[in-house]
Amino acid sequence: MDGGSESATPLGATLDRGGVSFALFSQHADAVELCLFDAAAPSREVARVALARDRDAVWRTRVAGLGVGTLYGYRVHGPYAPAEGQRFNPAKLLIDPYARAIMPLAAWSDRLLGYVPHASEEDLARDDRDDADVAPRSIVVDPSFDWGDDRPPRVPWERTLVYEAHVKGLTVLHPAVPADLRGTYAGLHAAAVLEHLVALGVTAVALLPVHHAVAERHLAAHGLTNYWGYNTIGFFAPDGRFATRGGRGEQVREFQTMVRALHRVGIEVILDVVYNHTAEGDRFGPTLAFRGIDNRVYYRLDPADPRTYVNVTGCGNTLDLRHPRVLALVVDSLRYWVETMRVDGFRFDLTSALARDGGAFDPSAPLFAALRADAVLADVKLIAEPWDATAEGYALGRYPAPWREWNDRYRDDVRRWWRGEPGRVGAVASRLVGSPELFAHSGRGPTASINFVTAHDGFSLRDLVSYDRKHNEANREDNRDGADDNVSWNCGVEGPTDDVAVNALRARQQRNFLATLLLSSGVPMLRAGDEIGATQQGNNNAYCQDDALTWLDWNLDAERAALLAFTRRVIGLVRRHAGLRRAEYLAGALVAAEPGGDLVWYAPSGRLMRDGDWHDHERRALGMWLRVGEISLLVALNASPGPVLFALPVDAPPGTWTPLVDTARPAALPRAVADGAYELAPHSLAVLAPRVSIAC
């Protein structure tokens, strides 16, 4: 095999008819070597090829005779001077940042560390032990794929229902998924799974990270793993954990097949992407890629002590998007997932960490400008987690169009309302109509708000109504990890109980949360499994639990089956009446509501809410009267521990009132209500229509 340079090729490994061209950026390296491995015996290195540096600090070579399945990595030479921010160590095999596939790490080894373990914190002496037999390998793949007549669904935001799911957890226990496909990309588009998603009304599956990830050292020491995957290292490579055939490159085609199948039933694919930090962690983490390629370029270092990293992510390091090459890496990755893998959008983890220029959050950050200007990325769905691990990074409501934002104010205010906290009536009213005080000032509508009550991080919905305290002992951190304040309510008993009244209240509270979420203006996000009463036994930080604690149990008892039926019913109601979810705010959400308007707030007495009512600390019941086009609905909420007799609005069109939804009577058939009042049970929500023609 002869090495040669090829100046026109992009970064990464590029196939041509006679071989493969390789290109790696490193501004401060002295030399770069390409290492090739035996595909039949991956630990055996068979060749090394020197790369030549061009004027743009890109190191290149072309090797004839190579093809799909080639295993490779890099050794990068340069100064090892942690006090100056440099961590070059040619004894460590490095992943290609642009690799399209990566072999999963077989097992953790201290030889992956670039420094001598147990050395003092001051010296960080270089570890010269070779790690090529245990380090991850990059894989040359052919990303071409027969997409047939595939078309992106392009579901408007106002009709979007996001379903947040884990590739493995969704299907690994599903009895109707073929055993060899469970927990994989292929399992996610098995017929039974597609049928469930379509019947539920899901329009977008938001997948927890599928970029190649490596578990943290301390987890491996405890026999745990980073199940969620928020410890990524390969921004172009679908994780081989979810492939059916060993993850030797097949994961690319299997992921593409999954996307194509979801598109065929009208479901978009949104990826949770983690560009804020990498799996290399803090200064005591492994040397897997960026740290050994050019530490000073890829990471934000502490100017006062370049041995350490700026850590606004809480994960040990922060990627430095201020450098044009690092920003280009992120944009190139996003473009690849849209153009080659055909995903429809992204949810950015800890987005504020990507939008800092040495200080606080910057709504004009280079990343935002780059995405707006990119013809490929300008029209995809972009969702921000609008904070990082610092108080300065919290920026809910401050992101520019066309970004949508995870609305944690929605989560907390709705939780506080339904557990009966005083003084919450004004807050829950704002969340019901799309949080205009957060988003209207920037010219964005209610769909700027991604509404959620639960997400992967925290309690499941069933646990939210079953536990007052976290129970994370399985994580092996003495229950110190995870949030202490969950804004939850166990309904009187901590954890599982045989108390019939407590279990009935918990079931009703789950229905209350689901109905509130689905009837609110904005974009609802449903945590996978909440519709079937999934539990994590009180663990609110199950990121390291790859077992039955986090896998969805599809063997439904009567209660869980009833919750699924209720969820489908409410989603069906909203889907049939598109005016319930709009791209623009209702007029009554922005100005004082008046009788006859599109939105009017009523007290249980039947009169309009007045200023004093909004400031009534003890008020726990509210009516939201909606008139949108041909739709007239009253949503009545009672978060108090006693029943409330709700007088139906007198300005409603003539006719008999019909309850379409009642969380206290989920199985009851609609019946006429002709006496001008409706009794709301304690802790319940009802939707009523003044015309029999509106049905659920």
Image (cartoon, helix red, strand yellow):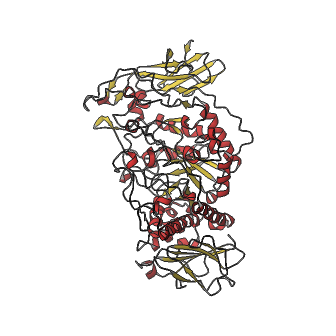
Q: Residue at x 32, y 24 (%)?
A: 126
Question: How many numbered circles does the render carry?
Answer: 0
Q: Quick one: 281 or 473, which is closer to the camera?
A: 473
Is residue 297 rendered to the left or right of residue 345?
Answer: left
Q: On screen, 106 above or below 277?
A: above
Residue 391 image-quadrant placement: bottom left
Q: Nearer the viewer, residue 68 or 227?
A: 227
Q: Where residue 312 sits: x, y (%)?
A: 37, 46
Give the farthest residue toward the right.
Answer: 149
When the figure is inspected, residue 363 is found, relative to residue 620, above or below; the finding is above
* Residue 634 can be seen, yes or no: yes
In percent of width and height, residue 412 lies at 44, 63
| Residue 256 found in image quarter | top right
Q: Which residue is painted at 75% across and 42% down in the image? A: 149
> Residue 187 placed where, x, y %?
63, 42
* Residue 354 visible in the current orientation: no
In the rendered image, residue 562, in percent from the top left (x then y), is placed at 60, 63
Q: Quadrant of residue 75?
A: top left
Q: Quadrant of the C terminus?
A: bottom right
| Residue furthest out toward the top | 2
Q: Quadrant of the N terminus?
A: top right
Q: Residue furthest bottom?
A: 675
Viewer-nearest residue: 520 or 185: 185
Q: Is residue 414 left or right of residue 445?
A: left
> In the displayed structure, would residue 670 be above or below residue 400?
below
